[in-house]
Image: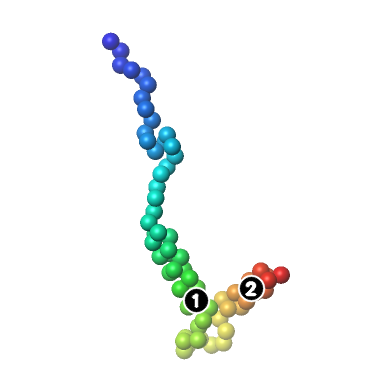
Amino acid sequence: MSAPTHTRPPRATRRGVDIRLPWWALALPVLAFVTLLLLILDPSDAHAAAGEPAIAHLMQWLRQLIAR
């Protein structure tokens, strides 16, 4: 007797991938990025900084570009 040829596909391919991440899996990288960005934009505590950093000019240019 022959074996049946129809097999059921794996569960992930029937309904698409069903992956659920916890809330902190997205919140922690966003928090880290925002914190580092704020540190770059406010270099007032940097004692060795001479003049305005180039990143501040870039961010000011971006703000002006977005405001148009």
**The C terminus appears in which quarter of the rendering?**
bottom right
Residue 58 occupies quadrant: bottom right
> What percent of the width, then of the height, locates residue 43?
50, 83
3D distance between C-alphas at marks 1 and 2 = 15 Å
Residue 54 occupies quadrant: bottom right
Q: Is residue 9 left or right of residue 34?
A: left
Q: Secondary structure at mark 2?
A: helix
Q: Do tag 1 and tag 2 residues touch (Cβ < 8 Å)? A: no
**Mark 2 is on which residue type?**
Arg
**Residue 15 vs residue 13, the one in the foreground:** 15
Give the residue number, with chain letter if any, for mark 1. Answer: 38
User: Callout 1: few (<14), some (14-19), or many (20+) C-alpha neighbours within 10 Å?
Assistant: few
Residue at screen point 37% across, 21% down: 6
Q: Secondary structure at mark 1?
A: helix
**Residue 57 vs residue 34, the one in the foreground:** 34
Q: Is residue 28 left or right of residue 38?
A: left
Residue at screen point 63% across, 71% down: 62
Give the residue number, with chain letter if any, for mark 2. Answer: 63
Snapshot colouring: rainbow
**The N terminus appears in which quarter of the rendering?**
top left
